[in-house]
Image: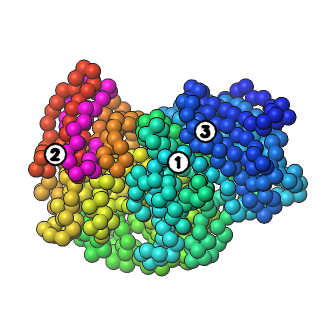
Amino acid sequence: MRNIFFLCCFIIFSAAYSQNTMSVSSPNGDLTLKVLINDGTAFYSVAYKGGIVLEDSPLGLITNAGDFTTNMNFVSSTTAKVEETYHQTKIKQSKVNYNANTLNCVFSNAKQQKIAVLFQVSDNNIAFRYELPAWGDTKVCVVSEEKTGFKFPSSTTTFLSPMMRPMTGFARTAPSYESGYEADAPLSKTTSSEGYVFPGLFNLANKAWILLSETGVSSLYTASHLSGYKNGIYTVEYPNPKQNNGFGSSGAQISLPGVTPWRTITVGETLKPIVETTIPFDVVKPLYKPSQEYKMGRGSWSWIVWQDNSMNYEDQVKYIDLAAAMKFEYILIDAWWDDRIGYDKMKELIKYAKSKNVEVFLWYNSNGTVNDAFQTPLNKMNTAIARKNEMKWLKEAGVKGLKVDFFGGDKQETMKLYEDILSDANDYGLMIVFHGATLPRGWEKMYPNFVGSEAVVASEMLIFSQDVREKEAYFASLHPFIRNAVGSMEFGGVLLNKFLNKGNTKGQERLTTDAFQLATSVLFQNPVQMFGLTPNNLTDVPAFELDFLRKVPTTWDETVFIDGYPGKYSVVARRQEQKWYVAGVNAEKTAKVLKLKLPMLAGQTITMYNDKADKETYTTNLKVSKNGELSITIQPNGGVVITN
């Protein structure tokens, strides 16, 4: 339920301002945004607690109907307040109170065409978008370029992931948001010609942290990313025209009046506002109602460790039995099921799973025309007729969700494909996970049956790459501050085999501890989690670890930053009802001794899962001091989980 109030609305004409400057502050006064015109260009700047965190940064769009980057003038501005309370079960916090002050600035260009920029400023967040009216008889336009910029102080360091070059990688499916991060890189080193994916994290000489992203991308616009660092700024950049094999516009075709997606800026003196932000969801609305109540939960998944050879009836029965033994709600049956099991036998398999109280997700290839991905089912999700025919069968067979893979692009037509799949799936009562996909941008709230996206160097790369195995803890320490801070992240983790293959005796050795793996089940937030357990883990993994995974939730009522530094270590607390889970990982080469402040557990007896110096995982009971402090040690490549 939402309650929205717009208060204190009034209009101020720019003629009253000799310097052509407007400003708006957050409700608590810590965050201030200023807008000005300088030599015909609109700029904005941001101050936090009196210090400049974004210097004068340009605003503007270029469309085929008019240029809104030069010869700009103030026309008017409007201020207001927004107060909203909403509930959302699929993000890091189930109840959110959003309060913001708004500033809506109207500008005109040399042709006297108007454009507005709406800013919403809450205590640690800024969201803004462009609002385009109809210009006379002009009712449509194409936005070809955006000049929105972000100018940081020169001492800033960055935590960015490069945008992948289009039509590269496996079966020419890139970009799929699966590049790594470089931590604390100076601005001068971030000059990638392809730019950088959202979100991007910035450290302003340890005086402030800023997280940049975007939200509210639907079929009505293209997704965007950050440019490389050029001429002292980053700008919003639209997709490389070579995506989707060069087909389709890289700009956005919109009807008028129309709006762009929101650009978001989260600012904090510490990393706490970054980890806890809900701004990607605060400014978007649901686009349709759920056709039914969707059930979140955990699942088993044969492909991640046993790979393609497991796509047979007998192995899937073993994984259904694994899910049942672990009290998991789901099994994900991956690529090639249509060919190697078949539709008729799949109905039998679904019936068997239901007899064990396990529901089924099935994998699909999204592709039909844009890359060379060949795994089947193919040509089932890319057109409306094929998709609806397939979804009719899926509903009749009792399937509960789909994992749709291999999108590889951010153009508007691909955003439309995402939305069409989600909307049609809702009609048939199907949840959707996207893989080989873009960043979800507010989709948990916009689409009721959306339950996660990959958009990260995920667990499959632990199987395929020694480099990723060596960096597993490093990446895990980054995600709560960057990728997972703005959207659900379907990582597909918790791998308890010592070797990441079916034999589990040699080969791809796992370099992190069991406690690390348990910690990621909490540290990585996604409402439906497919875990990488294998049937042999029922007998070769300590019983207390399995008992933990039988109970760990996938949905949360509250998320709290505890401690950490991206690329080094991270500790996050999450609550479901009255039960807290505190999870941490250590990416450094030596043991990390931490004194945690856990006021939510003050005076309570807790259970801790941790590692000994020899990396053996153990569990013990401890009492937290009355002041809520608890000293712990996390081993290198290790983890810790604390529950009450």
Q: Position of residue 376 (x, y in %)?
A: 42, 76
Q: Position of residue 452 (x, y in %)?
A: 44, 54
Q: Depth check: give the residue in front, 127 or 518.
A: 127
Any mark on residue 365, and which?
none
Q: Quadrant where the N terminus lies?
A: top right
Instruction: Tell me, for residue 611, which label it has, or none.
Output: 2
Percent coordinates x, y for residue 384 in the rendering: 59, 69
Outermost residue toward the top?
A: 626
What amino acid does circle 3 point to? Answer: Val
Q: Earlier in the sequence, mark 2 or mark 3?
A: 3
Nearer the observer, 212 or 231 = 231
Q: In the figure, residue 143 lies in which quadrant? A: bottom right
Which residues lie in the magenta part? 584-608
For badge 2, the amino acid type reads: Asp
Name the residue that disc number 1 marks.
154
Residue at coordinates 43% horizontally, 74% vertically from top-left? 169
Disc 1 crowd, CA 10 A, few/some/many (<14, 14-19, 20+): few
N-term mark: 3 or 1: 3
